[in-house]
Amino acid sequence: MKGNGTIKMVCYSDMNVEQLEKEREGLLKAFEECKAMGLKLDMSRGKPGSEQLDLSNPMLDIDLGGSGFKCSQGVDIRNYGILDGLKEAKELISAMIDMDPENIMIFGNSSLNIMFDTVARSFTHGVMGSRPWCKLDNVKFLCPTPGYDRHFAITEHFGVEMIEIPMTPDGPDMNMVENYVNNDESVKGIWCIPKYSNPQGITYSDETVRRFAALKPAAKDFRIFWDNAYVIHHLFNGKEEELLNIYDECVKNGTEDMVYIFCSTSKVSFPGGGIAAMAASKANLEYVKKNVTFQTIGYDKINMMRHVLFFKDKNGLMEHMKKHAEIIRPKFDAVMEVLDRELVPLGILKYTKPNGGYFISVDVPEGCAKKVVAMCKEAGVVMTGAGATHPYKNDAKDTNIRIAPTYPSLEELKKACEIFVLCVKLASVEKYLQ
């Protein structure tokens, strides 16, 4: 159809059978041509690309011996000691997450590891004197959905009952959260990625954060697992979003023991080679340190100091993140341009445009997500498994797919998007023909 000199795309839902059959015939031919190309493209994980990793290479050349390998606490960073991390490293993380350094503990290189250990510790030794979770008949976690598959994998590993909480544009459905937390003693935690959430890129509204801080849990050992993974990961597109400080809000409500805040520099410097931290009330941290002392004599202070000398302060962090954004923003723009041009007008795809983070979350027609991902793989494009963004990998509507644009080159990404678009169209046409 033509209108005002432009081509107007017809929604698949408005096509008759003959039109759909003709569309399917053309798509099948294009699909076979794609398969014959023998492509091997990967959009399965949110990994930084090589160009991003190169940004931190100068860190590896830093001379740590200039001050005799001594930190401000007078300890040789090459030796044992300082269980909770260098003062300088705490100050760097403080600049990242806006927390008092005294409320921060530096661990190893993985915030996911800290979260796993925190759940494990709760099962074996309880939470600040509570009954160990392993001795309870039932332990439940609330899971904002779609969400992070590795969060869900941790709780599934421990046999925790996971309860889906739908995401809204403001964050998790807080009416449901309040109902569960305030009335069910078996609800012990909730997973949250409050800024540029994985996978939708949603930042929790001020009201949502305040309602979290005002929760009145039926369980005294309930904890909010506040995974601030993307707190400085803006796309720097003029739409940087602000997140209200949950710890400050908890202090106002006298609930500061209720929240654990996690972060790392894994996608700031080197994945698997960054520094990770936990921020919490002093009471929580003292309990954690008392238990961690049996695990280690101290974490990698050499790596902590390397990061401190490289980034220096918040300004150094943000300038570094702007360089990341210059590399990945064109990739996000390329994906969204294709989605807006090829799929949204057909009425077969919806998505939220992120202003930061690492993912684009799309919803295809109900019952089509697994088929789309399988066809993409057949055509040489590996994507995150359909259902991964839901607890137990069970997306009841089979509709959500997570796109990870950062790892491929821009050229590879454009090819992968073409194939993804083709597969969504083909799966949708076949659904309407049914």
Image (cartoon, rainbow, N blue to C red):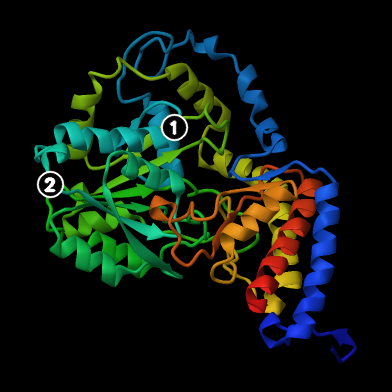
Residue ID at (47%, 67%): 397
Q: Which amino acid type is marked by label 1?
A: Ser
How far across and how far down the image is residue 48, in percent? 63, 39
Point out the residue furthest to the right here: 5
Residues 261 and 395: in front is: 395
Q: Is residue 215 left or right of residue 344?
A: left
Confirm whether residue 192 shows in the render. yes
Residue ID at (64%, 53%): 374
- The secondary element bearing badge 1 is classed as loop
Residue ID at (34%, 61%): 164
Instruction: Give the residue number, with chain letter if any, for mark 1.
Output: 110
| Image quarter of the C terminus | bottom right
Instruction: Give the residue number, with chain letter if any, for mark 2.
Output: 137
Residues 198 and 287: in front is: 198
Confirm whether residue 236 shows in the render. no
Which one is closest to the eye, mark 2 or mark 1?
2
Q: Which amino acid type is marked by label 2?
A: Asp
